[in-house]
Image: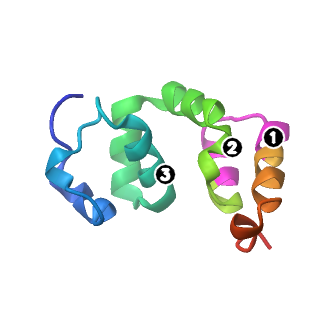
Amino acid sequence: MNAALPAFLTEFFWDCDFSTLTFSEQPDFIIRRLLQAGNWEAITWLRAELGDAALRQWLEQHNGAGLQPRQLRLWEVVLDLPHARVSHWIRATASQPWEGRLAR
């Protein structure tokens, strides 16, 4: 995972120097960005790179990583995340005034 990211991911990292991003040095940033904004191709790549077990573990370690409720419910189903835990993440997001504006 030290190699450069595939070029098709460039559009998701428009605000940084894409050529300096590596999965080994910025895994949290890359995973979070792709989960939040990635298209089908980006998500497929991420799942192939990490594997679903590691992605599940990452989401659990990051308490849902600030994803929107719809995104969290999708990953709940895809990765077989515990419903109660995902619901907790959604409630926590809604309790933050800035993030909660999208959860209504």
Q: Where 52 falls versus 66 (above or below)?
A: above
Q: From the viewer's perspective, is the residue at label 2 or at label 3 nearer?
A: 3
> Which residue has dot 1 on it?
83
Q: Are marks 1 and 2 in contact (CB under 8 Å)?
A: yes
What's the residue type where badge 1 is placed? His
**SS under mark 3:** helix
The stretch of residues the image draws in magenta is 72-86
List x then y, in percent, for residue 10. 23, 60
Which residue sits at x=77%, y=34%? 82
Which residue sits at x=30%, y=59%? 13
State the image quarter where residue 77 is shown.
top right
> Which residue has dot 3 on it?
35
> Which residue has dot 2 on it?
76
- For the N terminus, give its image quadrant: top left
What's the residue type where badge 2 is placed? Glu
In the depicted view, which residue is nearer to us: 21 or 5? 21
What's the residue type where badge 3 is placed? Leu
Neighbor class of circle 2 (other Cα within 10 Å; few <14, some 14-19, many 20+) is many
- Classified by dominant secondary structure, the portion drawn in magenta counts as helix
In the depicted view, which residue is nearer to us: 47 or 28? 28
**SS under mark 1:** helix
Q: Label 1 vs label 3: CA separation?
A: 19 Å
Which residue sits at x=40%, y=61%? 39
